[in-house]
């Protein structure tokens, strides 16, 4: 999946970037440990929450989060209050598979934002607050920075995301690692040199984290795939399409790539079944048909393309 450390080091033109590139390769290969977050002093009681921001929308009408009383006697009871019950309602729900106490947030009738406070029932001063927003569409996320950065506690609605990355360091490195609430990780970007392109998170989850390893300036824009488009697509470089409806037809899908180097990979994602189909997998110049691709008329789909040049994905009816 990745170039080895030697190749990365050899491709770096500036000595100050070599160590960052080596660390990036080592991290994604499991060789470098990520510094742990600051640990609270054991004697200080606090209400532990899995996130301090909840985003509700038509694409995420309910969201759960974990809560716990830390450094307090076993059996300590927690309670909560909601500043504006028109924006969201909150209730306790069943324990998760690891035994954590959980709160369920449900979308209300009013748009806007409100504060939810989770506190110790017998000591309300020990509390944590969560900002809850209720919007008319799923959130987009924009991050910008320089060098390494960790982003934790994203509660992404369960919809696919177009992750568009711009990294400007022509002689450096950029890596982006995504981890969901279940601890499953996926490398979204692993590039030497300046880079701009899109990749996808097939389904957002609660408690998402992003790990960025970079030697220069970067920007990440994550946009939900909500807009509708046509089946046939063309473009240049890495790309994530909008969604399109199936037509109850069986198609031949012609995939072409005019780049002389680099991988050419095309995935068709089914939003209703949480499945994906590989339409093309090659390197350099490419031109092949994937036959008998059925598109259910009750399902929506989208494409993710990896390429280093111009490409085409064309659907034709059999």
Image: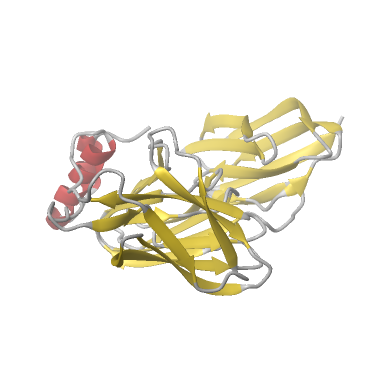
Return the x and y of residue 193 as percentages of the image width and height.
32, 53
What residue lies at 67% left-to-right and 36% top-to-bottom?
Answer: 255
Is residue 187 visible in the rendered image? The answer is yes
What residue lies at 67% left-to-right and 41% top-to-bottom?
Answer: 271
- In front: 37, or 94? 94
Quadrant of the snapshot with the C terminus = top right
Image position of 55 (left or right of 151): right
What residue lies at 36% left-to-right and 57% top-to-bottom?
Answer: 194
Quadrant of the snapshot with the N terminus = top left
Looking at the image, which residue sits at the far front? Answer: 122
Looking at the image, which residue sits at the far top? Answer: 292
What residue lies at 19% left-to-right and 44% top-to-bottom?
Answer: 23
Image position of 86 (left or right of 127): right
- In front: 242, or 215? 242
**In the depicted structure, whether residue 204 falls above or below residue 25:** below
Return the x and y of residue 236 as percentages of the image width and height.
57, 52
């Amino acid at each position: 999946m990745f170039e080895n450390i030697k190749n990365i080091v050899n491709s770096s033109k500036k000595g100050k970037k070599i160590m960052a590139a080596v660390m990036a390769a080592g991290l994604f290969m499991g060789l470098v440990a990520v510094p742990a977050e600051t640990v609270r002093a054991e004697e200080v009681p606090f209400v532990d929450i899995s996130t301090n921001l909840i985003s509700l929308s038509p694409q995420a009408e309910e969201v759960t989060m974990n809560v716990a009383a830390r450094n307090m006697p076993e059996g300590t009871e927690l309670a909560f209050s909601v500043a504006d019950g028109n924006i969201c309602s909150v209730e306790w729900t069943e324990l998760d598979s690891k035994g954590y106490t959980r709160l369920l947030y449900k979308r209300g009738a009013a748009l806007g934002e409100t504060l939810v406070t989770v506190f110790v029932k017998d000591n309300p001063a020990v509390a944590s607050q969560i900002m809850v927003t209720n919007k008319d569409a799923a959130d987009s996320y924009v991050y910008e920075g320089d060098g390494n950065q960790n982003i934790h506690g994203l509660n992404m609605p369960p919809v696919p995301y177009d992750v568009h990355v711009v990294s400007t360091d022509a002689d450096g490195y950029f890596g982006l690692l995504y981890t969901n609430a279940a601890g499953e990780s996926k490398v979204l970007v692993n590039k030497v040199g300046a880079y701009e392109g899109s990749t996808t998170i097939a389904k957002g989850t609660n408690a998402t984290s992003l790990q960025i390893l970079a030697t220069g300036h970067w920007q990440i824009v994550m946009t939900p795939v909500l807009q509708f488009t046509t089946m046939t697509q063309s473009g240049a470089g890495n790309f994530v399409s909008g969604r399109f409806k199936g037509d109850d037809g069986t198609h031949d899908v012609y995939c072409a790539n005019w780049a002389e180097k680099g991988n050419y990979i095309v995935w068709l994602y089914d939003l209703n079944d949480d499945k994906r189909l590989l339409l093309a997998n090659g390197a350099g110049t490419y031109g092949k048909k994937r036959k008998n691709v059925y598109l259910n008329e009750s399902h929506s789909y989208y494409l993710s393309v990896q390429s280093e040049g111009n490409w085409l994905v064309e659907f034709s009816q059999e």
